[in-house]
Amino acid sequence: MTTHGPVASHTPRSGDLLHVNRSASVQFINPIAFRVIRVLDWPTYDGWVWLEGYQLNARGDAVTRRSIFVQPAGLVIEARTTPRSTVGQPRRSGSNTKARTDVA
C-alpha cells in the first residue's frame, strides 16, 4: 500500500483533506479524496468515527456531500489546514471596500 501523507493517528478535524481507502473501511474499494467539514458526534463502535464532508474529484472540486463511517487509524491525511486566528489582527481592505465619509 502506498500512502501519500501521514496516517491519521487521531480523529481528523475540519478542513483536513483525506485519502480514504480500504484501510479506513471496506466500503472504499475505490479510494476517494475527502474534505472534512466536521466530525459527527453520533454513537459508534470504539475505533470508528462518522465524518461529514465533501467527496472531491480529480481536480479537487467538491462533487458530493456525504457522511462516511471510518476508522481514523486507516485514514491518510493529504493536507491539514490550520485555523487562522483573526482576533486582534487588522482588517484587510479589499478593492471593493469603500471608505465611510459620512461620519459626524
Image (cartoon, rainbow, N blue to C red):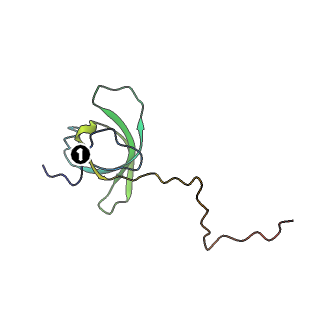
Residue 99 quadrant: bottom right
**Residue 40 place in picture, x, y as percent:** 41, 35
**Residue 67 place in picture, x, y as percent:** 37, 40
Count of marks overlaid on the render = 1
Which residue has dot 1 on it?
7
Residue at (60% x, 70% y) in the render: 94
Spot the residue most to the bottom: 95
Q: Amino acid at mark 1?
A: Val
Spot the residue most to the right: 104
Give the left or right position of residue 47, taking residue 15 as reference.
left
Residue 66 quadrant: top left
**Residue 17 place in picture, x, y as percent:** 34, 52
Above or below, 92 relative to 36? below
Residue at (33% x, 34% y) in the render: 49
Give the left or right position of residue 96, taking residue 4 as reference.
right
Quadrant for the C terminus, please: bottom right
Few, some or many residues within 10 Å of mark 1 (<14, 14–19, 20+) = some
* SS for callout 1: loop
Residue at (37% x, 54% y) in the render: 63
Above or below, 29 relative to 46? below
Front-most of residues 98 and 87: 87
Residue 38 quadrant: top left
Front-most of residues 58 and 97: 97
Spot the residue most to the left: 1
Give the left or right position of residue 25, taking residue 54 as reference.
left
Give the left or right position of residue 94, taking residue 99 as reference.
left
